[in-house]
Image: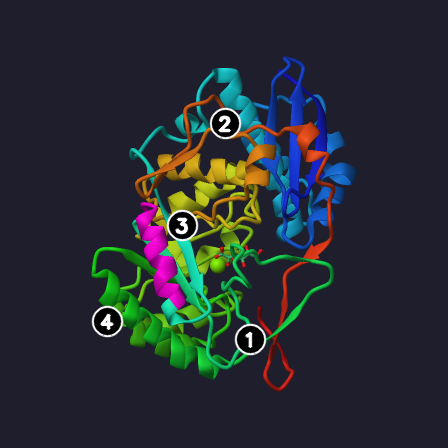
Amino acid sequence: MKITNATVNVCSPGRNFVTLKVETDEGLYGLGDGTLNGRELAVVSYLTEHVISCLIGRDPFQTEDIWQYLYRGGYWRRGPVTMAAIGAVDMALWDIKGKALNTPVYNLLGGRSRNGVLVYAHANGADIEHTIDAVAREIDRGYLAVRAQSGIPGLDSTYGVAKGNKPYEPAERGLPSESLWSTEKYLQHTPKLFERLRKRFGPDVHLLHDCHHRLTPIEAARLGKELEPFHLFWMEDPTPAELAEGLGIIRQHTTTPIAVGEVFNTIWDAKILIEKQWIDYIRMTVAHAGGLTHLKKVADFAALHHIRTGCHGATDLSPVSMAAALHFGLAVHNLGIQEHMPHSAETDAVFPHGYSFHGGYMYPGDEPGLGVDLDEKLAAKYPYQRAYLPINRKLDGTLFDW
Ligand code: GCO
Ligand code: MG
C-alpha cells in the first residue's frame, strides 16, 4: 500500500479543528488531529508546506520509520507545532493500519487491558455552592471521577469556570481577552471547596483539580498539604512545568498526587520527572506529543516508575484525538484516567464517531481503525475563525501564567 495524497481540513464547528486526511492507493484513508489551540494555522502550514510532499509514495504501515523520518530527519526537533504535525500524521497512519487489517487500533497497541477507560468530567461554578451543584450533576450522569474548579471571591473570572450558562471553553474568538489573578485569593479559597465537596459526596467519588500552571513550588506544596485530608485523585499542573526541579520540591512536602504533561511534546520533557518519580500521572496529549507511536513509549517508560497515564482530553482536541486516546487508554497497562470534556453537538456531527460513554467509563468502539470520520461537506459550513486563549495578569498588571 502507498500513500497517494494528503489534505488538511480546517473547520470551526463552535471551535477550530485541524484534521489531516491521508489517502492511499487502495482507497483507504486515515484521519489525524493536528489542532493546536490558538496556533492552528501554524500546524496547517507545517503540514502543507513541509510534510505532505514527503509522505507521498511511502508505505503507511511504516509508522515507526515515518515517525523517525519526520522527527529525527527534520533536524529541528520538538516544539508544539512540529509535534502536533507529526502527531496528526501518526494518528492517520494508525487509522489506516487498523482499517487495512480490519481491526480497532487498540488491538495494534497490545489489545484490551481492561473493559473500559475510566474518565473524569469537568464541573465548575461561579462559587462553591454552584460548583457543588455542578459536581452533583456529573455524578448523576454516571461519572465516577469529577474535576472541580470554582470562581474565586474577589476575581471576575478564572481558569476552568464558565461565563454564563455555556459549557466551559477556554478559547475565545477575536483577540485574547485578559483576566486578573491573585494567588493569595486562590490559595485561601480552594481548600474550602474540597472540604465541602468531600463532606457532601463522601469518600468514593474521585475528585480532581487543575491549578493550570499558576503556583510556585512552595505555594503548590502548601495547597497540596491543605488538600491532603480530602484525598484528591490528583492536583494537576501545580507549577509551570518547564522547571522539572520545582516538582521535586512539591514532592517533599505533600502526598497529594501530582499530574502534569498537557503542554509537553516529547518524552524528553517528562524524562526527569518520571525517573525521579516526582509525578504520579503523565497526561500528555496524543496530538501534541507526536501521536500514538511516541506516546506508547512514554507510557512504557512511565510504567517502569510506577507512573500512570491521564491523557489530556479538552474540547480543543478533536474527536479524532479523543478516539486515539481511548484506544491507547484501553490498551496500555498503566492507564490512570482519561479526561472527558464532551464536544458540542455541532462538533459531534462533523466528526461522526464510534466511541461512547457509559457508567463512568468510555469505550472506543470496535470499528476498524480509530472509528472516527470527517463529514467534509458539513465541515465546510463552519469556516476557520481566529481564536485565542486568554491572557492573565496579576492584580497589579504584571503578566502572569494563564
Ligand atoms: C485541561 C486543560 C485545558 C487547557 C486547554 C488549552 O486540563 O483540560 O488545562 O483546559 O487549558 O487545553 O488549550
Ligand atoms: Mg489542565
Q: Amino acid at mark 1?
A: Asp
Point out the residue furthest to the right here. Answer: 49
Element marked by disc 2: loop
**Relative to 340, is 263 above or below?**
below
Q: Amino acid at mark 2?
A: Gly
**Relative to 366, is 339 above or below?**
below
Work out how far the residue at label 3 is from the one at label 2, CA to CA, in angstroms: 21 Å
- Neighbor class of circle 3 (other Cα within 10 Å; few <14, some 14-19, many 20+) is many
Residue 253 image point, x, y percent: 31, 75
Residue indicated by mark 1 = 156
- Neighbor class of circle 4 (other Cα within 10 Å; few <14, some 14-19, many 20+) is few
Work out how far the residue at label 4 is from the one at label 2, CA to CA, in angstroms: 42 Å
Q: Amino acid at mark 4?
A: Pro
Point out the residue furthest to the left here. Answer: 203
Residue indicated by mark 2 = 371
Residue nearest the observer in this picture, 87 or 352: 352
Residue nearest the observer in this picture, 224 or 366: 366
Residue 136 appears left or right of 315: left
Work out how far the residue at label 1 is from the one at label 4, CA to CA, in angstroms: 29 Å
Point out the residue furthest to the top here. Answer: 26
Residue indicated by mark 3 = 310
Residue nearest the observer in this picture, 301 or 203: 203
Element marked by disc 4: helix
Element marked by disc 3: loop
- Neighbor class of circle 2 (other Cα within 10 Å; few <14, some 14-19, many 20+) is many
Ligand 1 under 8 Å from disc 3 Cβ: no
Residue indicated by mark 4 = 229
Residue 125 image point, x, y percent: 44, 65
The range drawn in magenta is 130-143
Viewer-nearest of discs 3 and 2? 2
Element marked by disc 1: loop
